Amino acid sequence: MKKLWGTSGLALLGIFVFSGCQETGSSFKSVSSAGGALSAPRPSPSGFPTPYSPTPPPPSPSPTSTPLPPGLTQGPLRVQGRQFVDKTGTPVYLTGAIICCELAKENGWPFISIEALEKIANHKANFTHVRLGPNTPDSEGPEFVAYLNVGNNKVDLYQWNPDFWIRLRQILQRARELGIYVEISLIDAWVLERPDIHAWAAQNNINGIDEGNCDMMRAHPRGIHEAWIRKIAQETGEFDNVMYEIGNETFDCGGTVTPEWELGIARIMRDELQKRGFGLRPIGTNSHESSIEDHFEIDYINRHVQKVLSGGSKPMLVNEYNGDFIANLTADQFLSHLREAYSKGTVFHLWRGDLGENKWNKFLIKLRDFHSEIGH
């Protein structure tokens, strides 16, 4: 699928998912976060080996959690049949907006800026989506690199970039205050297809680790993958408005995705969430693979298709489609898609794609009208 490239990544074959030019001028206040050295992996669930090579340093201390301020979300969400319900058992119909790709960097992609969050909230969106990479400094910009940037487009996989996690937590908290649930895509397969921009590829780190390609999805997650997932759980699990997509476009990574990989990621995430007392969060797949989608450990299904989905036995959501598909729709046609999805018990999110600012605003108005129609 065609992606947008920004000035910081023109020297590369591509950049991390649909990027534009580098975001500037953002200011994020700290919501307590743990930086420092990469924690050595805990024993993984049975059957999931986690060897490191070379051996990582000792674990860094766990973050000291302070109570989060109140928010409008009533999570954590859980799945009940074909729908999400909140902590009171009330159904929550998620329909939101994803800011990629037109003016992507201006709106904070592959995260989302506070200003963009507030704008979609003003149009009654209750969902958005962010992607964590792991990126290299030259692909998305240093502010979107989770590991320590050591220069020359290389990272140290045994040390974190605290500012990355502070920024992510700030976004999650503001979304929570606005009543928006945030889907976090854990490991982006679009980036795995491009080892030149992936932090786990040998040429992009100083640790001698070469795990940045699609072939790693043929087997159980290994040490560097497990440490990454546990770090995400540690930093985001206390937020009641998060849900997790195992990986963006794992269906489109050379046909390599396996149940061993996706279920392994899901098990590690649930294990860490429970160890830290956060409770469970919904975990979904974008594998387009029935052996994964139908598995009882997968809570919901994401598809990248140019149509409204028919209902299945669990929540089914369209969270991306071709940019020219949405650009060729009218705002009224988009509203018809929202209504059709609702009638079928599925979800059709607003993916910006190639929409210019004027048309994007018109589509957001239709999103707001739809939420008003269904009583949100």
Image: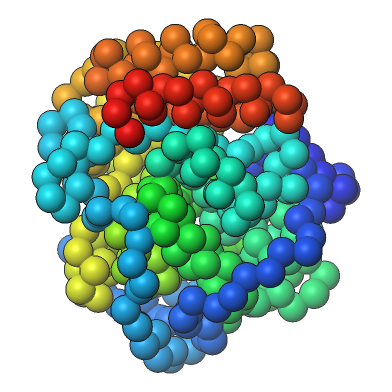
All told, the count of numbered labels is 0
**Residue for point 39% across, 66% down:** 236
Query: Where does the image place residue 250, in percent across and percent down from the top left?
Result: 46, 37
Question: Would you say residue 265 is visible in this rendering?
Answer: no
Tell me: 16 left or right of 72.
right
Query: Where does the image place residue 290, in percent across and percent down from the top left?
Result: 28, 26
Tell me: 196 left or right of 321.
right
Query: Which of 129/205 is in front?
Result: 129
Question: Would you say residue 76 is visible in this rendering?
Answer: yes
Residue 281 against residue 315 in the figure, above or below:
below
Query: Which of 149/213 is in front?
Result: 149
**Residue for point 73% across, 30% down:** 357
The quarter of the picture where the C terminus appears is top left
Colouring used for the render:
rainbow
Tell me: 115 left or right of 128.
right
Tell me: 113 left or right of 84.
right
Residue 242 figure quarter:
bottom left
